[in-house]
Image: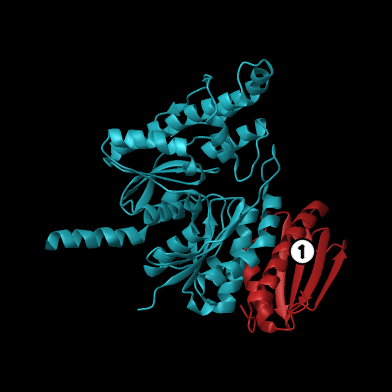
Chain colours: A red, B cyan
């Protein structure tokens, strides 16, 4: 997905922020518009177990930053993995159907 | 005037489909891909979602190409809001949200059951039938009344298609193209009728007991040469289909309607169609049914139903474009039917 997402950095910590397990990562779309599109598409779906997993997203400088927090590692893993799947899908959709793409 | 065009996405179960239709019901393209599991296994949400992830984008390209349209020609993007499995539903929903922003097109959320009904009506020309909606996830007898599709009878546990699919796993029949088709073919060779529980409860039906009974006894019966797999398929069909015909007939009597429309994946079954046709003809009505192109989940049915709603002023905001595993048929206000009904009423008056 190098066309619209040039860099993905993941930083997993187990340092307590609020809940014991957290994970931060960033996708650089190099485009405020594309980052915003992915943000808006994924923000609609809330975490299914808000009492166990929290997700926060922000967009700035063409980058989408995501912060996960969970009470147990397995909840963090499940939410993170499901989220990355749809994030990848949204990104690929932009790559294949975004501006300047010949259909 | 330019014809309105919708792009529809369906991914609530093991089929992922993208369809292009116009408001008059013409289907310009309707490609789909089915997740077929090995014999003896069903499809699980996670794996099914992975299948959809892999196929959805190529399907969009194929749908646009076959229909010979560009994104500019599209009026609205329609997706299945529910009912269905959560993870597979999310795949089509996320793609629609992204495309809606890229192409600046409105979104229309569609109820899967209502989409089956509208597709069946437009393909067969059935005007106001009692609808039997039978698939792997749903079993309902439905009729339109005062703005909504009302459920007159339904399964109280598992869907008839679920019962058939899981029975196919007992016999380790192939899931290609679908378990129900293979049961139907094998049933044609059945000769001996095995008594199975017949479970109609008022307007409702129940299939889980029949399935449990078969799961508990089939192996033993086959081992002792009491019957063949074909006999079991035959007996199962000859038990569950009459249950469906019975509750459909009761709904017809109640609503005073003569015609029946069968939709949903199990609706492809020709034996079910034959039984229903006999019942309809005895009541002086007609049976409307379609083949696997329209019966089985597809993108065009979502596109068409979404377009009916959109043409009547309905659309879904991006922030509200959620999906849900439970979404009953009668939650939807079928405003496109109200307008037609009232305009017919006016015409009658002016005549």
The percent position of residue B20, horizontal first and vertical second, equals: 49, 66
Residue A101 visible from this viewpoint: yes
Residue shown at the point (69%, 61%) measured from the top left: B54
Q: In terms of image quadrants, where is residue B189?
A: top right
Residue lying farthest front? B189
The answer to whether residue B183 is above or below residue B99 is: above
Q: Dividing the picture into quarters, in which one does residue A45 lie? A: bottom right
Q: Which residue is mark 1?
A: A68
Above/below status of B194 relative to B73: above
- Tell me the quarter of the image containing the C terminus of chain B: bottom left
- Does B278 sit left or right of B179 as displayed? left
Crowd tier of the residue under label 1, counting other residues whose Cα lies within 10 Å: few below 14, some 14–19, many 20 or above: many
* Rendering quarter of residue B333: bottom left
Query: Circle 1 marks a residue in which chain?
Result: A
Mark 1: secondary structure? strand
Choose between B48 and A34: the one closer to the eye.
B48
Q: Position of residue A85 (x, y in %)?
A: 73, 62
Between A49 and B75, the one nearer to me in the picture: B75
Apparent side of residue B279 relative to residue A23 in the rendered image (left or right): left
Q: How many marks can you see?
A: 1
Where residue B34 sits: x, y (%)? 62, 52
What residue is shown at x 67% (from left), y 79% (from top)? A34
Give the answer, above or below, for where A38 lies relative to B81: below
Say if residue B313 shows up in the picture: no
Q: Residue B264, percent across and down?
A: 48, 46
Is A60 situated left or right of B125 in this image?
right
Residue at 63% in and 76% down:
A97
Q: Dividing the image into 4 quarters, which one contains the N terminus of chain B?
A: bottom left
């Amino acid at each position: 997905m190098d066309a619209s997402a040039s860099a993905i950095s993941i930083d997993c910590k187990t340092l307590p922020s609020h809940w014991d397990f957290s994970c931060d990562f960033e996708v650089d779309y190099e485009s405020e518009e594309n980052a915003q599109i992915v943000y808006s598409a994924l923000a609609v779906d809330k975490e299914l177990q808000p009492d166990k997993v929290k997700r926060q997203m922000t967009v700035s400088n063409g980058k989408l930053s995501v912060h996960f927090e969970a009470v147990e590692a397995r909840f963090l893993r499940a939410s993170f993995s499901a989220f990355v799947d749809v994030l990848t899908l949204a990104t690929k959709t932009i790559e294949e159907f975004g501006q300047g793409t010949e259909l | 005037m330019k014809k309105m065009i919708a792009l529809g996405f369906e991914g609530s179960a093991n089929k992922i489909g993208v369809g292009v239709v116009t408001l008059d019901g013409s289907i310009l393209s309707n490609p789909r891909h089915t997740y077929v599991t090995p014999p003896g296994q069903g499809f699980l949400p996670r794996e099914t979602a992975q299948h959809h992830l892999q196929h959805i984008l190529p399907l969009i390209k194929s749908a646009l190409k076959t229909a010979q349209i560009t994104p500019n020609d599209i009026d609205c993007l329609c997706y299945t809001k529910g009912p269905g499995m959560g993870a597979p539903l999310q795949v089509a929903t996320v793609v629609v949200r992204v495309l809606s922003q890229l192409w600046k097109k409105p979104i229309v959320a569609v109820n899967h059951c209502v989409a089956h009904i509208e597709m069946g009506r437009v393909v067969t020309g059935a005007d106001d039938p009692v609808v039997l909606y039978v698939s792997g996830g749903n079993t309902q007898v439905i009729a339109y009344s005062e703005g909504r599709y009302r459920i007159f009878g339904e399964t109280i546990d598992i869907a008839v298609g679920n019962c058939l699919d899981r029975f196919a796993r007992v016999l380790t029949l192939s899931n290609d193209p679908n378990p129900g088709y293979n049961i139907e073919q094998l049933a044609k060779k059945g000769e001996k009728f095995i008594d199975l529980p017949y479970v109609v409860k008022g307007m409702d039906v129940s299939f889980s007991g029949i399935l449990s009974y078969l799961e508990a006894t089939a192996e033993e019966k086959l081992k002792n040469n009491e019957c063949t797999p074909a006999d079991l398929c035959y007996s199962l069909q000859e038990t569950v289909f009459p249950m469906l015909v019975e509750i459909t007939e009761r709904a017809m009597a109640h609503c005073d309607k003569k015609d029946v429309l069968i939709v949903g994946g199990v609706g492809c079954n020709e034996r079910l169609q034959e039984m229903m046709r006999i019942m309809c003809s005895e009541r002086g009505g007609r049976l409307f049914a379609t083949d696997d192109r329209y019966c089985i989940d597809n993108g065009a049915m979502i596109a068409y139903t979404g377009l009916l709603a959109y043409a009547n002023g309905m659309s879904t905001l991006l922030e509200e474009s959620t999906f849900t595993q439970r979404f009953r048929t009668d939650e939807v206000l079928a405003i496109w039917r109200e307008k037609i009904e009232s305009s017919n009423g006016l015409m009658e008056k002016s005549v």
